[in-house]
Image (cartoon, rainbow, N blue to C red):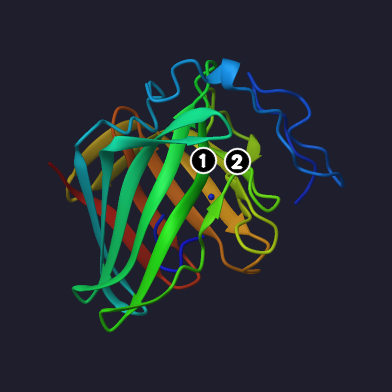
Amino acid sequence: MKKVLMLCISAFVLLTGCRKDHYKPGGTYKPDISPDEFSSGTVITNPYFPAPPGKKYTYEGETAEGSEKVVEQRLAETKVIMGITCIIVNFKAFVDDELVEEAWDWYAQDNDGNVWYFGEAVDNYEEGVLVNHDGSWEAGIDGAQPGIIMPAHPYVGLQYREEYYPGEAEDEAAVIATGLNVTIPFGSFDNCLQTKNWTDLEPGIVEFKFYAPGVGLVKELNQQENEEIVLVEIE
């Protein structure tokens, strides 16, 4: 999970539309990734992760570190990873108006409609100074494997890996509710999806994310820290 609030076990439930060797309890996680199954990887049609080109999403909330703002925007550039052309989403996180993290996230949608996460390049800042690139990983390098950031057919009980770089990036998620109404100051959204998100690298920390069709992420909640961040603007 990202160090700021933002922006993914028992036996796994297999993903609809995905190869059945993705999840082997007690075994090695290595999804069968083929470029042939990503013929239109940069065309994102998944309603819960639309990633429209050029649109800028802004989120705000109060955290233990201070007032947080997150800005995400899909760029025009692409990146080829494991033979698959991925879109690039720029992520910027600010605490009390100071940039603390900037990342370039790589996603692609397979032919079944699952949106895969292929890694990220991360810059971490302290007091305006670049200090490290902790959290960076790229699928296919040093044992890292892609994960699914949003399944094509989410249903309650579905569990999946969002990312996999052993010891560094091991976010997991489970769908725990569908058909929700979510109301935030920005607006009300119907037929929303709720996920539970965690990582074994940070035991005891659980987040809940709410996604609206046609919009994407609208709210994220960390109950342990009593922190919430919500969508405040799309431009």
Classify 10 Å Cα crowding around label 2: few (below 14), some (14-19), many (20 and above).
many
Label number found at residue 179: none
State left or right for residue 106 relative to residue 212: right
The answer to which image quadrant residue 88 occupies is top left
Residue type marked 1? Tyr
Say which residue appears at 31% left-offset and 49% top-offset. Answer: 90
Q: Position of residue 171 (x, y in %)?
A: 59, 53
Q: Is mark 2 on a helix, strand or loop?
A: strand
Question: Is 220 in front, or is 109?
Answer: 109
The answer to which image quadrant residue 202 occupies is bottom right
Label number found at residue 117: 1
Residue type marked 2? Pro
- Assess whether mark 2 and mark 1 are in contact (beta carbons under 8 angstroms): yes
State left or right for residue 109 relative to residue 10: left
Residue holding disc 2: 146
Question: Is 68 in front, or is 129?
Answer: 129
Q: Position of residue 120 (x, y in %)?
A: 46, 51
Residue furthest to the bottom in view is 127
Looking at the picture, does residue 228 appear above or below residue 173? below
Q: Where is residue 80 in the image (x, y as percent from the top left)?
A: 47, 34
In space, the residues marked 1 and 2 are separated at their CA atoms by 6 Å
State left or right for residue 231 relative to residue 125: left
Looking at the picture, does residue 233 appear above or below residue 33? below
* Location of the C terminus (image quadrant): top left
Classify 10 Å Cα crowding around label 1: few (below 14), some (14-19), many (20 and above).
many
Instruction: Count up the numbered dots.
Output: 2
Say which residue appears at 27% left-offset and 65% top-offset. Answer: 61
Say which residue appears at 58% left-offset and 22% top-offset. Answer: 35
